[in-house]
Image (spheres, rainbow, N blue to C red):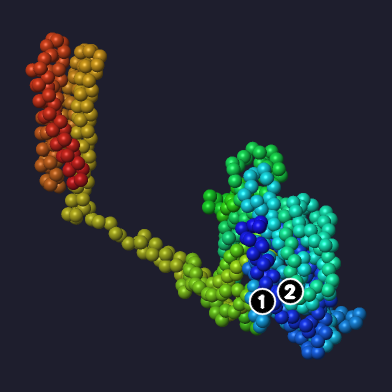
Amino acid sequence: MRKIGGCDLSLVLLAISFSVLFAPVLSDLVISKVDRRVDLTSQHVRLFTTLKVENNGTDSVSEVLLPFPDHQSKNLAFLTATTTEEKGKSKSSSQALPIKVVNPEGMPISLAWYSASLPKELGKGGQLTLEIRAVFTHALRPFPEKITQADAQLVVFQDSAYYLSPYVVKAQSFTVKLPEPRVESYTKLENAKLSGSEIKYGPYENIPPFSYTPIVVHFASNGPFAVAKDLVREIEISHWGNVQITEHYNLIHAGAESIGEFSRLDYQARPYLRGASAFRHLIAKLPPRAHSVYYRDEIGNISTSNLWGDSTKTLLEIEPRYPLFGGWKTSFTIGYGLPLHDFLFQSEGQRFLNISFGSPMNELVIDNLIVKVILPEGSKDITVSVPFPIKEWQEMKFSHLDMVGRPVVVLEKTNVVPEHNQYFQVKYRFNNLSLFREPLMLISGFFFLFVACIIYTHADFTISKSSASYVAKLQWDEVQTAIQQFQGVMSRCLAIHDKLEASLRDLSRTGDAQACKAARKAADSSLKELSKELKSLLAFLQSSPQAAQILPKVDELVVKEKELQEKLMLKHSIVVDAFEKRSGGRDTESRVASIQQKITALRLEVDDLLEVIDEI
C-alpha cells in the first residue's frame, strides 16, 4: 500500500467508496454533460467545472448540490457558481449564485456539501448551465518530501476521473493541465491520454451517481510555493490626502524541504539547475499611483528590488536577501502611499473606503490574513461590507496628537488566495470640524511654548553671589577639586612604589645593581616633588571648614602612605646591600619577609582609605 504526501490514499478512497455506495440518489436532476478542467501550473489548484443541468422530474428545483470529499474540502479556499439559463437556442446573461454549506439528510458524512441557490426555480424540462470555479490550497503534496539543492521538485495531485455528484451524469470529461511536460507517472484508465503538458480523461458516458474513480498524477513543479503564514495589512486613512498601506509578511517556502548543504557558488553559476526549486523574487501589483514605496526587514532597507509602472499599474519586484528553498523562511515589510481621492468617497453624509482586501502578490497562499483599517480620530457609525465571510472586530489605536484614539476595524480570514483580492467597503461618519483638532493643538502648543520662553528670558532666576548657600557651594567645589588632586598625588606615589618593587624583581632576574640604584634615586626625587605638592593641598584642606568631615581620613592616609614608603625603602636597601655583598642568608630572607608582610598590610590599608575618600 503506497503512502503519498503523508496521507494513506487507499484508506481515504475506501472510506469514500463505502460512503457513496449506500447514498440515496437524487433523481429529479440529471447532468447531461460535465466538462472539468484543473489547472496545476501553480500552487493554487484551480478547478473549473461546466455543468449542463436538466430537470427531468415533476417538481421544480431551487438548488444544485455540490459535494467535495473531505480531503479536498479542508483545502477549499474559494468557491463560486454562475448560471446561464438555456431555452432552446437562446441564452440569458450569466449571474453569480449564492453558495452556502448544507447537510442534506441521508447523504454521506464523508463529503462536504455546498448548495448553489438558483435565481429562480428550474421547472419540469428546464435546462441551465452552471460554471463552477473552485480554488484549493495545499492540495499539491511534495513527493519526495525532502530534496537536495540540485533536485527538481516533484509533487502529487489526487482527484477522481469521474465527477463526484449525487445526480446521474450522461457524459463527462476531465482535463489536467500541468506546468511542464515532465510527468513521472499518472493513473492510466480507459480513454486516458497524455498530450504534452495535458492529461485528458474521457469522455465517459452514463455514469451513475456518486461514482468515484481515483487518479494520482506525479509531476514536476518548480514554481514558487510561497506561503504567508501570517500577513498583517494596515490601511491608515488620513483626511489630509493620503492612504498609507503597510504590509508585514511572514513567509515560508512550502515545497519539498531542502536537505544537505547550500552552495552559493553553484547557485550563482547555474541557478536553474542548482536551485530549480527555489524562488528568487515575487511581484507585487500595486495601484497605478502608488508612491513612497519601501521594502525592508528587521535589518533595514533591502535594495534588491525594482519598481516600475504606468497609468494602469505599479509593479514592485521583491527579491529576498537570499533565495528561498523548501522549508526556508523570511520576514519583511512593504509600504506605500495612495492618493486619498482614488479610494475614499462621500455619499449621503457618509464617507466610505473602497479598497482591495488581499495581498498584491498573486503567487502567495496566505494561511492567516489580518486587515486593519485605521480610521481618523472622531469617526463613528462604522459599518463594513465584505463579499465573503470573515471575522470582524474593532479596537483603538493611539498615535501622535491623539486624545481619544483612532478606531480600528480588524478583519481576519484564513486560507486566502488571489481570488479574494476583491474590493470591500468601510463606511463611517466624520465631522469636518474634527480635521482642525490637531492643527489647533499644534498652534496652542507653540503659542504656550513661546510665552514660556518670553517669561524665562525676562525673569531673573540667578542665586545671589553674596548668599551663604552660594558661598558654601563654591567652597565645597574647591574642596572637591583639592581632594581630586590629593587622590592624584597618592596614585602617583603608589605608582612609584610599584616601580621600586619592579626594580627589585629585575635585580633578581638580571643582576644589574646599578639599574636598581638608579631606580631608587629616581624614586627619591619624584617622591620629594610629590611631597611638596601634598603639603600645599593639606594646608588648604586644614584651613577649609567644608573639609572637616573628610580631613581625618586624609591625615590617616598620609601617615599610612609615609609608613609604607619607609618600609619599602628599607626593604630596597636591605636587598641591594645583600646582593652587592653577596651576604644573602636565612637571616636576611627573614628580615625581608617580615618587612614584606608589613608592606602588604599597609598597602591594603592605603587602598581602603582611598576608596573611603572617593565615596565621601
Label 1: element kind = loop
- 430 or 322, which lies in front? 322
Q: Position of residue 433 (x, y in %)?
A: 55, 77
Counting residues from the N terminus, which is met first, the one under dot 1 or under dot 2? 1
- Mark 1, residues whose alpha carbon is within 10 Å: few (<14), some, or many (≥20)? many
- Furthest residue toward top: 581
Q: Which residue is mark 2?
A: 210
Q: Is residue 339 left or right of residue 408?
A: right
Q: Amino acid at mark 1?
A: Pro
Q: Residue at x 80, y 65 (%)?
A: 174
- 105 or 503, which lies in front? 105
Q: Is residue 278 left or right of residue 311?
A: left
- 562 or 408, which lies in front? 408
Q: Quadrant of residue 160?
A: bottom right
Q: Which residue is mark 1?
A: 108
Number of labelled discs?
Answer: 2
Q: Is residue 361 left or right of residue 573?
A: right
Q: Amino acid at mark 2?
A: Phe
- Furthest residue toward right: 89
Q: Position of residue 24 (x, y in %)?
A: 71, 80
Can you say which quadrant of the picture contains the N terminus? Answer: bottom right
Q: Residue at x 23, y 29 (%)?
A: 495
Q: Position of residue 13 (x, y in %)?
A: 68, 66
Q: CA distance from mark 1 to mark 2?
A: 10 Å
- Mark 2, residues whose alpha carbon is within 10 Å: few (<14), some, or many (≥20)? many
Does residue 277 show up? yes
Label 2: element kind = loop
Q: Position of residue 168 (x, y in %)?
A: 79, 77
Q: Mark 1–mark 2 contact, CB under 8 Å? A: yes
